[in-house]
Amino acid sequence: MTAPKAVLFDIGMTFIHPSGQVMSEELAAVGVPGVGVKTAEAALATAAEAHHLDFPQGLSRPEKVGAARGQLLRVGAETGRRAWRRCTDRADLYRDLDPDAVPVLRETCGRGLAVAAVSNSDGTLTEELARFGLLDFFTAVVDSTLTGVEKPDPGVFASALGQLGCAPADALFVGDGLINDIFGALRAGITSTVLYDRHQVYRELPVPVITALPQLLDHLPARLSNFRNEGRGTACMSV
């Protein structure tokens, strides 16, 4: 990878994680007690992009995720769908801030890189980042609902790059999804990518893989001398 001048981050399941405790509780509520927090989280990490599949027919995107998760947990597709529906109905599902989020973002900005959030969200991404104390780290915030396209469509990545004033070749994308994040970024011309595989779902991929956020810092330049990032409102511009 060439040294990036900007870093684009996915948010959900990269910085802000769905609670394994919530998922375990809702599995118990539909008759599947005893599923551990880490197991519940890993099953979702594996099934999260199942909505891209064209089967089972007749299911909504969340239902496909729930069904796949239920099958991975060996409790059945229907039970998985019911449990996941209960999870997504809870306002506190996405409540766990990655313990390394703030230090890594602070260090990334401190090295002079411009930082953007690029997320498939429901129009509330800015508010969510503010609630977790992350908003001020980002020069650009791109919410798929407000942009009108979502990952892996290249348009959502292009929106962030345009706000930063950066070419795809000058950017690095970091996210947890192989389809939405890695393939989406590549489709947008961002050839430098890092997959955050927190639950070690993947093995031997031909892209950089990290299992903890601080490992990302090894893929960033020590300091940019001709670029700057001063937080909100500062573009990726030569100085």
Image (cartoon, rainbow, N blue to C red):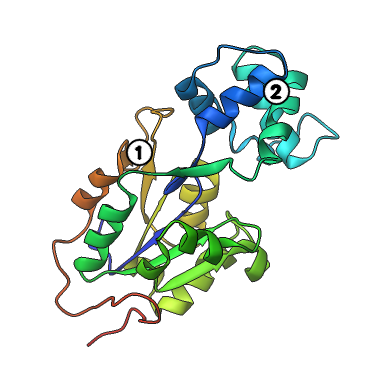
Q: Is residue 216 left or right of residue 144?
A: left
Q: Furthest residue to the right?
A: 58
Which residue position holds label 2? 80
Q: Quadrant of residue 112?
A: bottom left
> At 57% across and 23% down in the image, what residue appears?
24
Per the image, label 1 sits on a secondary structure element best described as loop
Q: Position of residue 58 (x, y in %)?
A: 86, 35
Secondary structure at numbered mark 2: helix
Name the amino acid type tagged 1. Answer: Pro
What is the three-letter code of the residue carrying label 2? Gly
Residue in view at x 47 percent, y 53 percent: 11
Residue 26's x, y, as percent?
Answer: 65, 25
Q: Is residue 217 above or below residue 83?
A: below
Q: In the image shown, does 43 or 124 lie closer to the viewer?
A: 124
In the depicted view, which residue is nearer to us: 218 or 109?
A: 109
Q: Name the mark nearer the viewer: 1 or 2.
A: 2
Compared to residue 143, the image places residue 59 above or below, namely above
Q: Nearer the viewer, residue 10 or 151?
A: 10
**Around disc 2, counting alpha carbons within 10 Å, would you say few (fewer than 14), some (14 to 19), or many (20 or more)?**
many
Give the side of residue 231 with respect to residue 88, left or right.
left
**Residue visible at 58% across and 40% down in the picture:** 93
> Which residue occupies the foreground of this view, 169 or 199?
199
First reached walking from the N terminus: tag 1 or tag 2? 2
Q: How many marks?
A: 2
List the residue tagged with mark 1. 206
Q: How busy is the neighbourhood of tag 1: few (under 14 within 10 Å), some, or many (20 plus)?
A: few
Q: In the figure, is residue 124 to the left or right of 98?
A: right
